[in-house]
Amino acid sequence: MRLESRLRVLPTSSSSLAAVTVVLLWLALAVTGLDVDPVEVEPAYWQREARRQLDAALEQPGAYQIGWEAGPRRAKNVVFFLGDGMGVSTVTGMRYMKAQLMGKWAGQVDLVWEAWPSASHIRTFDLERLTTDSAASATAYLTGKSASLLFLKCLQCPS
């Protein structure tokens, strides 16, 4: 059988060709494999790398500006707001919705906590997945240690 006659059995529509291309690329990656450098598995490597990048960034003139000064009084309490499920895309969606309800553009409105004097954004992970449940997330925030997905309250309890 000639090569031209065998090529006719391949899909000719653009969506079919795109699907075949994606499958072939996926197979090529799966066959070749992407090896992980054994050094990158160790947490100490990432701590050293983070320190190196931070030091390099801080050495650049104008890279940071200190604009916070302690007030004359010490805080008696700390209020910790944990916005579960509030990733960047969700917060952006909230801003768009608030702006739409107010008849404004999203860049013209702020969410309430954006006006607070101190706020930050932290991302946590559990030990198995990138998207974590609330209990593992709160455990990571409050203890600094990751927990397993669905590990907390895995036994029946009367509460």
Image (cartoon, grey):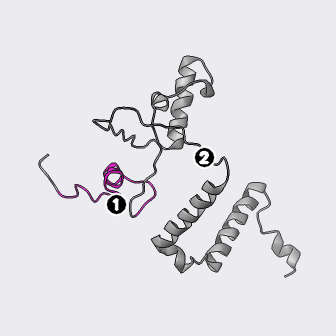
Give the number of the disc on residue 6: none
Q: Position of residue 118 (x, y in %)?
A: 45, 36
In the visual, does 146 lie left or right of 112?
left
Asked if the residues shown at circle 2 and circle 1 are in contact, with their CB atoms under 8 angstroms apart, the answer is: no
Comparing marks 2 and 1, which lies closer to the viewer? 2
Separation of marks 2 and 1 at Cα, in angstroms: 29 Å
Residue lying furthest left in this view? Answer: 158
Q: Which residue is mark 1?
A: 145
Q: Is residue 156 above or below residue 88?
A: below
Q: Nearer the viewer, residue 122 or 101?
A: 122
Give the mark nearer the N terminus: 2 vs 1: 2
Q: Is residue 133 above or below residue 68?
A: below
Task: Give the magenta range.
Answer: 128-155
The residue depicted at 45 percent of the width and 48 percent of the height is 122
Q: Is residue 39 above or below residue 59?
A: below
Kind of residue at disc 1:
Lys
